[in-house]
Amino acid sequence: MKRNSRMRGVGGLLALALGLSMLVGGCRAKTPESSAGSSETAAKEETTAVTAESQVAATAALPDGVYTARFETDSSMFHVSEAMHDRGTLTVKDGKMTLHVSLQSKRILNLFPGRAEDAKKDGAVLLQPTTDTVKFEDGSTQEVYGFDIPVPALDTEFPLALVGTKGVWYDHQVKVTEVKAEEVSQAAAPEIPGLRFVKRMDLRYAKTFDIYFYEKNFALIDVHGAARYLVIPEGETAPKELPGDVVRLQQPLDHIYLAATAAMSLFEVNGALGDVRFTGTRAEGWHIDAPKQALSSGAMRFAGKYSAPDYELLTSEGCNLAIESLMILHAPEVKEMLERLGIPVFVDYSSNESHPLGRTEWVRLYGVLTNHQAESERFFDAQCEKMDTLRNVADSGKQVVFFAMNRDGSFVVRRRTDYVPKMIQLAGGHYVGVGADEAGRSSVQRVSREAFFEAARDADVLIYNATVEAPLKDLAELKAKDELFADFKAVQAGEVYQLGGDMYQSADAVAGLTLDFYHVLHGETDVPLQYLRKLS
């Protein structure tokens, strides 16, 4: 499967084995149920402990870590993709279990941990899908929906309702069994001739890439479904029999052409801004100070936008890496020309991450490219800590619409699987999807005026995305765009906010904007907002 399976290194397995031995030895905290059946439970644990080494006692409280587990359902119409052999990835953090499963298609739109009748009630928190790419044994791939399912207990049935494309909710009983510790081995990692595999980066949220480390500080970056890159340390050379599809990136990568605007702030926070010599955005296009100042001082130069780079400038000043956004896929001739000139091209797929922190976790990838891993780890840990303050946040019950308007009067909304709806959900809100998610790579889609007004009229909160078109001055300007806005519940209640243009260029935007959503949804009017501005 192309999704990250988060395999652990040898040290992690040793720690896991120690943790499991402590559990079997009687260190597990007792609940009223476990005390009543302590003799029976101890016998079961003892029996389980002597089975296959990777098998985990389902009756024990699992140590924090990543496992694989079997997902059983009561219906042949609701099951894991055949490519996954009925298994998913079980993550245990702070004693809470979550199972990620990749289903057989995109026909199931939402899940609900409970009964169908409760899923239809106002304020019900639905599980939103991720878009996963599964790989079959014949090498073919398929895009399907995946879900992160809270698991109350192992080897015990629990209710899980679902709704499909027909809009009808159905009740199901599911069970999580056969939990095993994930293993990592040389066989599981891509083989690099002449290099011994050491470990795999333990990613927390990112799903679109993996990084494998080898001896002599070599690293292989696998951007799923796109390309593989071998990072070659300074003073070393690439193995002679390197697979033909692997792009060579020779360090130091210190004359970078960064055309992926959203990635600039990640280079700033990990201390590698000095490695960015060229940018695809002029000074007036930046909302953050660092690139503005670098362009003003001459430390950074404008080398043309992504679709029309200044090839002469890049080659004459020794550009040794071009980092592009997904927009380069619309200009394949540019990518080909850069490569023909000896400039390797790295394509940033962070916009395809379904979890907000998955986008931020790309800072760790850029830390590997530029030898700034320690700084990248510190920054990412700090962002995770900020988001952890919203763990188990109360459900506000409020419906949120996040939108923009084009000059032609059409509306632009985020797909339900995009990271912005996920941020709203994490903050305790409910994202209002408009229309059916269209097929394609883009995280946004256009919808008709009629479809938008039908879905958004009764929403509790409106958030206007001013990063698409010019910002609004006030509510009056919004109403002037279309007279029907005056009838909106959120407009009448004064719950309309605007997102500023600096959000997409700020490295800490994920945590900062999610906290803004939380303050708005929970009525904390005395707290200053970082990225949102209330329209009045």
Image: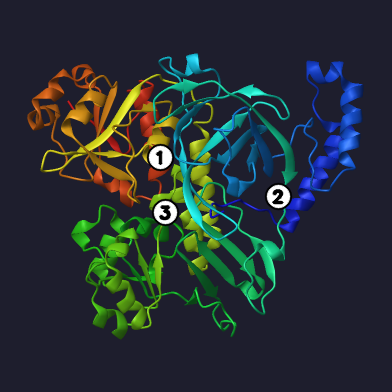
Q: Amino acid at mark 3?
A: Ser
Find out whether the residues at labels 3 and 2 contact each other: C-beta distance under 8 Å.
no
Q: Position of residue 160 (x, y in %)?
A: 57, 24
Tell me, for residue 417, which label it has, or none. 1
Q: Amino acid at mark 2?
A: Glu
Sort mark 3 into few (<14), some (14-19) or many (20+) by Cα contacts within 10 Å: many
Residue drawn at 53 percent across, 30 percent down: 391
Q: Quadrant of residue 410?
A: top left
**SS for tag 3?**
helix
User: Of marks 3 and 2, which one's residue comes earlier in the chain?
Assistant: 2
Number of numbered labels in the structure image:
3
Using the image, determine if residue 366 lies above or below residue 523. Answer: below
Cα distance in 3D space between marks 3 and 2: 25 Å
The answer to whether 326 appears left or right of 482 in the picture is right
Query: From this viewpoint, which residue is outermost toward the front?
Result: 76
Cα distance in 3D space between marks 2 and 1: 27 Å
Q: Position of residue 487 (x, y in %)?
A: 15, 18
Residue drawn at 65 percent across, 75 percent down: 216
Asked if residue 318 can be seen in this view, the reply is no
The answer to whether 106 appears left or right of 454 in the picture is right
Question: Which mark's residue is nearer the viewer, 3 or 1?
Answer: 1
Residue designated by label 2: 182
Identify the coloring: rainbow
User: Of marks 3 and 1, which one's residue comes earlier in the chain?
Assistant: 3
Residue designated by label 3: 350
Query: In the depicted view, which residue is nearer to us: 374 or 193?
Result: 193
Residue drawn at 86 percent across, 37 percent down: 48
Q: Position of residue 27 (x, y in %)?
A: 84, 32
Residue drawn at 25 percent across, 56 percent down: 286
